[in-house]
Amino acid sequence: MKIEKDTVVTLQFKVAEANGKLIEQSKEPMVYLHGGYENTLPKIEEALEGKQPGDQVNLQLKAEDAFGVRDESLVRTIPKKEFPPGVKVGGQLEGRTEDGTPHVFHVMKIKGDTVHLDGNHPLAGRDLRFALKVAGVRAATAEEIEHKHVHGEHGHHH
């Protein structure tokens, strides 16, 4: 079966910096619903369209086509007293952007009485290389299409 809209795609992947330094390699396969459901990067979907199990794709993406350019307005320094006890570096919390939209922020460091937060994706601002291998393709169920994500093994569980 070929990858097309409303198929469930199983991938093995590697993500590296533009210079080839490995950032992440899949231990478990990534499974996503293909077809514009925002379950993976649009350029990855575009490159995988029409591929079949066993096919491999190598992509080099500029930051704006990967996880976006860094937005320095999403970097914040907040007084530690405004946080619940137990705030730790590496933690995540939901805050709001300047226009009030809910957004996830990462705790980057705690220095004295201040907490440094970053709302950018950890890979934002970086050109990346993706090595993708299609491990499987199947038709999505009606429920997966309705919910806009994969169910079951390696997918979403309700």
Image (cartoon, helix red, strand yellow):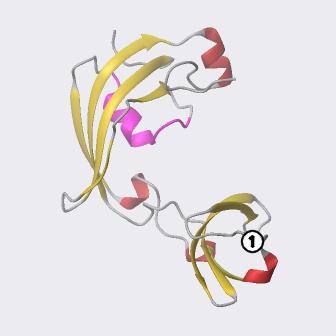
Q: Is 18 placed left or right of 6 in the picture?
A: left
Q: Is 73 placed left or right of 82 in the picture?
A: left
**Residue 150 sits in quarter:** top right
Residue drawn where x is 51% and y is 17% of the image: 6
Q: Which residues are magenta?
A: 38-50
Q: Which residue is mark 1?
A: 98
Residue drawn where x is 76% and y is 65% of the image: 96
Residue drawn where x is 71% and y is 69% of the image: 86
**Residue 1 sits in quarter:** top left
Q: Position of residue 131 (x, y in %)?
A: 24, 41
Q: Position of residue 7 (x, y in %)?
A: 46, 17
Residue 131 drawn above or below residue 70: above
Residue 103 drawn above or below residue 12: below
Q: Position of residue 153 (x, y in %)?
A: 50, 20
**Residue 22 sits in quarter:** bottom left
Residue 17 drawn above or below residue 83: above
Residue 119 drawn above or below residue 153: below
Amino acid type at image mark 1: Glu
Please check the rendered image and state whether residue 9 is part of the magenta-colored stretch, yes or no.
Answer: no
* Outermost residue, bottom side: 112
Please check the rendered image and state whether residue 49 is part of the magenta-colored stretch, yes or no.
Answer: yes
* Outermost residue, left side: 20
Residue drawn where x is 79% and y is 70% of the image: 84
**Along the viewing direction, whichever of 153 and 123 lies nearer the viewer:** 153
